[in-house]
Amino acid sequence: GGSAMSAYNPLLRLLRARSAVTLRLCRKVTTWSPVGAAFNAQAVRRSDLFRKNVGLFGVPELSSTEGFDVIQERALLETDQLVEKACSSSPGAVTVETFDKLSDSLCRVADLADFIKVAHPDPLYREAAEKTCINIGTTVEKLNTNVELCKSLKNLLDNEEIMAKLDPETRRVAELFMFDFEISGIHLDEKQRKEVVNLNVRLLDLSNKFLMGCHMPNRIDKRALPHHIHQHFINEGNYVQIGGLHADAPDDLVREVAYRIFLYSNGEMMHTLEELLSCRNKLARLVGYQSYSHRALKGTMAKSPDTVMNFLQLLTDKLKDRFNIEPSLYSPYFSLGACMEGLNSLFMQLFGVSLLAEQLNAGEVWSEDVRKLAVVHETEGLLGYIYCDFFYRPDKPHQDCHFTIRGGRLLDDGQYQLPVVVLMLNLPHPTRSAPTLLTPAMMENLFHEMGHAMHSMLGRTRYQHVTGTRCVTDFAEVPSILMEYFATDYRVINQFARHYQTGQPLPQSMVARLCESKKVCGAADTQLQIFYAVLDQIYHGKPQSRSTTDILIDMQQKYYGLPYVPNTAWQLRFSHLVGYGAKYYSYLMSRAVASMVWRQCFHKDPLSRETGERYRREMLAHGGGKEPMLMVEGMLQKRPSTEDFVDALVSDLDPDFETFIMDSDG
């Protein structure tokens, strides 16, 4: 771990080279810290001819696509040995440790492949990774229905005397593994278990098909569109390709055309979605749940579909109808380097943690503009690595996301397996004359994803099965959404928002306008989220005798109010149905928790080290190793009710809230 400091030298050289350029552009030079400089400089292409290719993420086998077979074979071999060990050891902490090693061995290959299959620019790598995902996925399904393996865990859980001696995290992890067996139908007879495995394999395939289709552009004959809007879309011979909603386009016609065509209903996709929902329902019924939604919500903060629907309904009842900002006025103050510096100083103040830019080895990353950060704690040392894949590439998914590549866990020799994550954004590239400049929304997204990364870095769980963001979905978004509150607080922004040319700080009046506009748009956005969440619940509830589009029209009228546009099928673009099936409400519930934590703990002083440490201790440190409501209770010192959740969201949208705080503080 001694390499973290050496990263400074090349960066300083880079800094000198950059500031010479900056001088020509403007009179006043802003000096960035090394982490700011690393992100405000263009990537320097180095010749890799003489450097040894260390393989993706430093995994030597992955210097070529054949390596996927190698790491997969090795993981499967290790799996067999660990299954053997789990089944032959007498019950105790060693059972849970063996299960966690088993999970780690498979996850390390699957998580890495999961990321590469969406992010790698080379289709051969994507294909190899995709194959690996399917093979490991199939192995996991088999393990989840392996009766011998389950018996070894059951022997532990049934032994009250031994269970009583285990620490709470070990007990919880044992229960979570058992839960995985149960939702996979371990209690069924052999014929039904086979059926469960087949359904799961079928679901992997359907999910992939649906996800691919969600992002596929639609084509329309050029002659069907007015000539003057052709240039807004990708032209292909006689066709125009429409790959998104173009919601930011100033021209109404462009937005309308994009909406109608991108969302145009597609029979094959409709069939895939219906089969996906039907397979999920069969699976849930087979393993003993009323619906897929019942199965998905077990173990979450919400616990049941009724709670979720009650929460969404209450929230709708309380939302009443509530000026627009010009993002380009803000961008010069939010250069990527400035924002990274802001994050660095925020984490330093809250947790005593710094972000240090690291030198990359040849072959370690999948694209030249990826940067690597070492996360270093002032006393605990190196905590882990964050790979920042921040810039737009043509074939990259348009979603901002956080991927766990390797989870943290305690190793047998007492060392800690350091977590490795990737943050993926779609930011514009820096140019010759300016660094990457972010709109307020992009800046907030960066803070959001960084919240996930810190959750991964600051957790120090004994088991990787519950490391960092590996917790229930409705809790996983809390640390990331909380970061959005920091991103719109003047006391935080003021520390880093500087004009990239003049070094002037962002005026406080502009921050105030930003917060206002968030509230104005906030209610509409929240209502839209409610509509999505309701739709997701209904789709995953008891099967209905009407089409997914009819359900959409009905729910849109009840929960959103904007009229449905004929012949569109928005649900076919709702890719979150795959990853968040029956759990899309999580975003709103997490926002409510984040709001309570912000208001009660951080609002008074968002830079307090004491509060930061308490937040790490009560919430971030446990990953999924502690029941989520207990973590919330530990932080807020009371257990919130559904009404508390609703009130937190509603008061977030109340324009008078801030002034009320100001008055009460004098």
Image (spheres, rainbow, N blue to C red):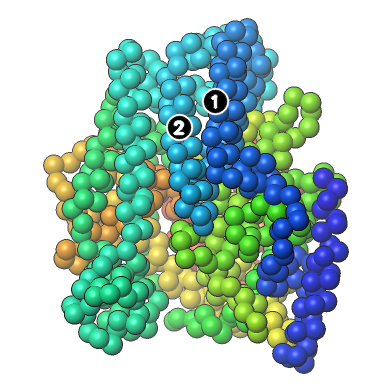
Question: Mark on residue 135?
Answer: 2
Would residue 69 be found to the left or right of residue 189 on screen?
right
What's the mark number on residue 76?
1
Q: Is residue 34 left or right of residue 651?
A: right
What element does badge 2 sit on? helix
**Which residue type carries mark 1?**
Leu
At 46% from the left edge and 58% from the top edge, which residue is drawn?
397
Q: Quadrant of residue 492?
A: bottom right
Confirm whether residue 172 shows in the render.
no
- Residue type, numbered disc 2: Asn
453 above or below 660?
above
* Residue nearest the viewer, comparing 401 with 119: 119
Sequence order check: which comes first, mark 1 or mark 2? 1
Q: Secondary structure at mark 1?
A: helix
Question: Which image quadrant: the C terminus?
Answer: bottom right
Q: Position of residue 509 (x, y in %)?
A: 61, 83
| Cα–Cα gap, marks 1 and 2 | 10 Å
Q: Position of residue 173 (x, y in %)?
A: 58, 26
Q: Quadrant of residue 372?
A: bottom right
> Is 496 on the left-hand or right-hand side of 89?
right
Q: Residues within 10 Å of mark 2 (few under 14, many from 20)?
A: some
Q: For label 1, count other residues whose C-alpha is less than 10 Å away and answer few (under 14), some (14-19) or many (20+).
A: some
